Image: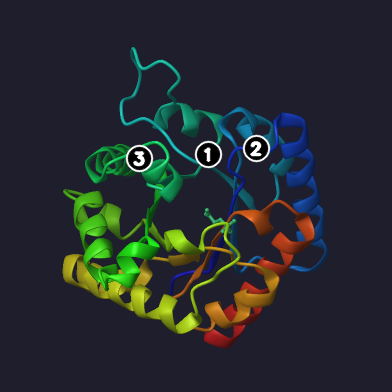
Amino acid sequence: MRKFLIAGNWKMNMGPGDAAKLAQEICTKLSEKSSNEVLVLVCPTALSIPEVVIATEGSRVLTGAQNMHYESSGAFTGEISAEMLLAAGCRYVVLGHSERRHVFGESDELINRKVLSASRKDLIPILCVGETEVDRDQELTFNVIERQLKKGLLKVRHEDLAEMVIAYEPVWAIGTGRTATPEQAQEVHAFIRKYLYERIGKKASLVPLLYGGSVKPANVADLLKQDDIDGALVGGASLNADSFVALVDAAETQNRNRN
Ligand code: PGA
């Protein structure tokens, strides 16, 4: 059975010192009470990855990156490769986040090259998909999600797809305080699950589907109760140890109820 995953996306916050401090605080608070059944991941800014890896050593907290380049090395000023992230201790990489798509102009084709590169090197991609408010108002949500899945996952091998994570993050809910209702989120998650079934059959049930967009302790339980929501990708509420650990606790409760 797939595991719940609570992932913190720290975005462009906290340099090495602050990031190590927060990581340490999360580890301490988790070890006081938790049961290891839920995967816990933090994705600091690239510069802070080594410090966070050291601060979380020996704990259950995994480290991931927020982006990468698809080539292994070469003349790509300012970029970081999958090999470098793995060497630094990363296990996951967030790809196609809406800020990368909308602020930095990343296309589905570029994101697909990154997904292929990461998954062939055992760095687990968390592919983000999500519609804008205009898309939703025009009833284009499922068209947009389907396009992002088809193009973003083009040529990904069956076995790699079964190991991936997909995050549904409606753009209108990110950093706005507006969360999708649990029913709205479940509807899209079920659509994503169905798409995966069509690609990889029963193994689709192994792929964790995360919801992201203004997730906080007050709304996480209702989201995680949905059949196809297996965790959360969290921005704002992951920058505070208490609220992040509260999300992990909620996932553990839900994990017990699901099994
Ligand atoms: P938010 O960000 O939780 O602050 O809305 C989520 C994300 O961007 O991954």
Label 1's element? loop
Q: Nearer the viewer, residue 35 or 152?
A: 152
* Quarter of the figure with residue 135: bottom left
Q: Is label 2 in contact with label 3 (beta carbons under 8 Å)?
A: no
Q: Tell me which numbered mark, 2 or 1, is placed earlier along the sequence.
A: 2
Q: Which mark is residue 166?
A: none
Q: Is label 2 in contact with label 1 (beta carbons under 8 Å)?
A: yes
Q: CA distance from mark 2 to mark 3?
A: 19 Å
Residue assigned mark 3 = 118
* Quarter of the figure with residue 163: bottom left
Q: Quadrant location of the N terminus? A: bottom left
Label 2's element? helix
Q: Tell me which numbered mark, 2 or 3, is placed earlier along the sequence.
A: 2
Q: Position of residue 15 (x, y in %)?
A: 70, 31
Residue assigned mark 2 = 53
Label 3's element? helix
Image quadrant, ligand 1: bottom right
Q: What amino acid is at disc 1?
A: Cys
